[in-house]
Amino acid sequence: MKKNFILAFVVASIMFVFPILVNAETVTDDYVETTKYLKTVTHYGNNFLLSNNINSSMTYEVSENEYNNAGDRPIITRDASGAVETTYKRMTVSIAKNGSYYRYKNILVWKTIPSQRSYDIIGIGFYSNLKLHSSVNFIQEYCYSGGSCTSSTSHNPQTFTAGAGTTFKLASGSLSTLKATIYFDLEKKTSATLVSQDAYGDYSHATSSISLTNAKKYSVVGSSGIVLDSSITSYYDSMGCAHAHWTGTW
């Protein structure tokens, strides 16, 4: 009986010190990052993947274990009403000291490459006591199933009072890997000392074909991340932000 009590106490203590989290977080004095693991379920109509087809999609946060155990190909099932596709991706947002400034970065990695590829949006929200010091940088990196790899920096950035984002054409072809990264440096708007910072990484994947003009109808607003115009919300999946919180002296 005493052994059982001691064992229960040890287990409870371990869970208190090392809680089971969906988000994975790394923290040092000058760096903090958070990773969020996501599963997207998209319902397509009978006109599966046609350019004029409007599809519905939901994204769910999952454990790192489920993400790691998922296959590297989309799961597609069909029935009389159309098809359902399940894909997995992970998003990592970070804050890192870069000289006199801080670099905010958001990385989206697809574990399973989506069938529908149009204009996606990636962004980072921040608080309005900061402003951009650098331009918005972007790179899309991908490998083809045949083994060759390449990258593209083609994108359409937009900046806002409390965030920045960019619209880009998701790579086409038979891909084995796909990653998109946005980053920029921030400076303070004030001479006061800041003791905390928050970065809100967000990503919107187009589950239906959309033009570049329409895909740019969004804003990035602090903790809300990417806010789509009501005219294009039905073209994109919906997912929450990955939040990195930094504490220190700046």
Image (cartoon, helix red, strand yellow):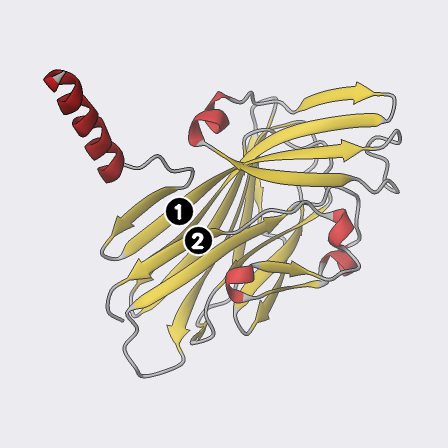
Q: Residue at x 83, y 42 (%)?
A: 54
**Between discs 2 and 1, the one toward the N terminus:** 1
Q: Is residue 232 above or below residue 248?
A: above
Q: What residue does disc 2 label?
A: 243
Q: What residue does disc 1 label?
A: 34
Q: Identity of the amino acid at label 1?
A: Thr
Give the quadrant of the C terminus. Answer: bottom left
Q: Is residue 44 above or below residue 237?
A: above
* Proximity of marks 2 and 1: CB atoms separated by less than 8 Å: yes
**Toward the viewer: 106 or 231?**
231
Compute the Cα span from label 2 to label 1: 6 Å
Q: Residue at x 39, y 52 (%)?
A: 94
What is the total number of numbered labels drawn onto the structure image? Answer: 2
Q: Position of residue 185 (x, y in %)?
A: 42, 65
Taking the image as shown, residue 193 lies to the left or right of residue 206, namely left
Q: Residues within 10 Å of mark 2 (few under 14, many from 20)?
A: many
Q: Residue furthest front?
A: 1
Q: Position of residue 249 (x, y in %)?
A: 24, 69
Give the quadrant of the N terminus. Answer: top left
